[in-house]
Image (tube, rainbow, N blue to C red):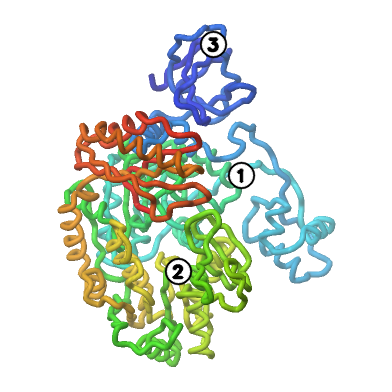
Amino acid sequence: MDGAEFSAGRLVAVLTTEPLDRLLDYKAPEDGVSTGDFVRVPLGPRQVIGVVWGPGEGGFDPKRIRSVSARMDIPPMLPAMRAFLERAAEYTLTPLPAMLRLATRAPGLGEAPGARRVYRAGPAEPSRLTPARARVLETVRAHGGLGFSLGDLSAEAGVSTSVIKGLEAQGVLIAGEAPRDPPYPELDAAHPGRALSALQAEAAETLRAGVVSGRYGTTLLKGVTGSGKTEVYLEAVAECLARGRQALVLLPEIALTVDFLDRVEARFGARPAEWHSGASMAERRRCWRAVAEGAARLVIGARSALFLPFRDLGLIIVDEEHDGSYKQEDGALYNARDMAVLRAALGSAQVVLASATPSLESWANAEAGKYARIDLPERFGPAVLPEMRAIDMRSQEMASNTWISPALAAAMRQRLEAREQSLLFLNRRGFAPLTLCRACGHQIGCTHCDARMVEHRFRRVLMCHQCGATAPIPTACPNCEVEGKLAPIGPGVERLAEEVAARFPEARVAILSSDLATTARDLKERIDEIASGAADIVIGTQLVAKGHNFPLLTLVGVIDADLGLQGGDLRAAEKTFQLVRQVAGRAGRAERPGLGLVQTHQPDHPVIRSILSGDEEAFWRSEAAQRMAAGAPPYGRMAGVVVSGPDEARTFETARALGRAAGLLERAGVTLFGPALAPVARIRGRTRVRLLLKAPKGAPLQAAARAWRDSVRPGAGVRVSIDIDPMSFF
């Protein structure tokens, strides 16, 4: 019934964004509706947004069926998008209304286009050119004639609104009206990009050919750090734009978008649309509508950008495709990498999965011939890959409460003398992961979670990294009330910075951690300063592993390479390998050679040996063999189940009832493990019990899991969440 029209009074089925388990029947309004139309409908006393999904089912008293209130002035949802939402909901066991909410997360979609008051450059000159006034004029002139709202201009120029109004009074600025959502500038697909090496040019031509075909296809673009993957896939973007189709580039972190937008602007002569949590509500509405109308040709975004209403999506780039940030861990549980492949398959688009250290899933799909594969084994230009060495911590003489080995300290000293940069990597935010009372042994934990509070000394708080709760750092133990006995245990990046300052007092130290940057632009400025040489020693969490280029950086020290190998995580080896190889790849990206030093107590561990040897294919083959033998993903299927609730007894009773219903799973070839308390047993005051479903590759896991879940009625306040293809088991 795609595109079907329904005249006044006909019954139509409407999917709303409300948490209901079915479509709702309404009568078509006076001017009729068509399948895919966005509408407003009455639901109880409220008006809610919905989409016409097809003909109504009927079977109700006609007098009780209400009419659609209005058809919204928005381009209709296309059949491929509706199919994508249905398939994504089916695969992830997510209610379809929740998927529609993902696809409509922009304010004011149904409002008529409005106007806003904006300021542009006028003919007059200021009576006196103060630094603040100069910044305003520079900002206005640098951005052409589009104009700024009062608030935006004030923020962009870093001045008070009175400065702007003063310039308006003198005629230096002129206020006028402009569309509330100004159009995006045209991107020039023919604008020349950077010169490519022979290998890059060959890779770019292969990707362009895929775009030209107009068919679905997925390509794994595997290139070592610094090989120029971005320049290669931007050529495919250029081809897509030249053919009049839309393109989407997904990035794993907001922190990467600012620098990436600059690169895209240099390539295409204008700034593209952006979609992420750091964008304002007005910017999100502007982007959503422009994408729906086909006016936004290129979008740079986070994982949720995949649910934007593209008119003709021809290419999806998933940069750093291995990154765990692509997995949505609450609400609708989906992996944007996998959903990108699904969306492209339904819309005859190409997908490029780019990474220096791909996920085992993508590597296995390429090995099996499901994905094409392109390799860029060399760095671009004169740069070469860093040498990798292990520092065996068992043989290092370490003073109490220090974490930098003498061998690493000596290498850092050499870089300081040579005026080169060092980077210390530790994947722990804050000052110390644990605060312990030396009088009674009490460990300060979160009152809402079964998790220890992490000291953040720079912010002078204790923070729970599970729920985000904060508390002042106490002077006395909250358990025994003895003062002066609380001690930080273990290092975080802030504590490592304290050690660096003591060892190298002459060095300029910078910390890169997500909790120390207020905005993406603030982080970008900090990174730019480091890249220009404003720091001698950089200390960072996993944030530093992602796409940053520091020309003066020649040494990377991994403080605790064994950290990620602990625990029972299925992907522990894979994640450790990816993270350490990625962070080591920050070294030696210019003319000067780089060195990666890996501090480890397990130098003979297979993962550490693989990291040092650089033989990535051997690592993937070994990891694949172990997973295959265990029937684990990607050679088998898993679903993680979390039963949670405020009352422990009711939560366990629901989990045990699910355990007793295991026969429903066994008939479909699905094995149930559990129930058992989750490793983090309480988060935000809710007890968590875990179960695990495991099945062969071809088993009907979703259908079996749905029937099994629906066979048990949860206790009051208890939720049952099923995560298909889980990334986390905690």
Task: Give x and y (percent) for residue 434.
Answer: 49, 69
**The residue under label 1 is which amino acid type?**
Pro
Relative horizontal placement of residue 667, taking residue 386 as reference (left or right)? left
Question: Label 3 vs label 2: CA separation?
Answer: 61 Å
Above-or-below relation of 193 to 176? below
Looking at the image, tell me whether mark 3 or mark 2 is earlier in sequence order. Answer: 3
Q: Position of residue 88 (x, y in %)?
A: 37, 37
Q: Name the element at disc 2.
A: loop
> Which numbered disc flags the more N-terminal residue, 1 or 2?
1
Which of the labelled discs sits on residue 8, or is there none?
3
The image shows residue 314, relative to residue 567, as above or below, that is above
Is residue 237 depicted above or below 7 in this figure? below
Q: Which amino acid is tagged 3?
A: Ala
Q: Are marks 1 and 3 in contact (CB under 8 Å)?
A: no
Amino acid type at mark 2: Arg
Where 292 sits versus 622, above or below?
A: above
Which quadrant would residue 414 be assigned to in this image? bottom left
Residue picked out by circle 1: 182
Residue 669 in the image, given as x and y percentages of width and height: 20, 36
Label number found at residue 428: 2
> Please, what secondary structure does the residue beneath circle 3 have?
loop
Q: Quadrant of the C terminus?
A: bottom left
Q: Are marks 3 and 2 in contact (CB under 8 Å)?
A: no
Question: Which mark lies nearer to you, 1 or 3?
Answer: 3
- Percent from the top left, x then y, of residue 520? 54, 61
- Structural distance between the alpha carbons of marks 1 and 2: 42 Å
Query: Is residue 683 visible to us here?
Result: yes
* Residue at (75% x, 67% y) in the render: 132
Circle 3 or circle 2, nearest the eye = 2
Q: Is residue 173 left or right of residue 553?
A: right
Label 1, label 3: how far apart the Cα atoms are = 35 Å
Name the residue rendered at 33%, 70% in the picture.
580
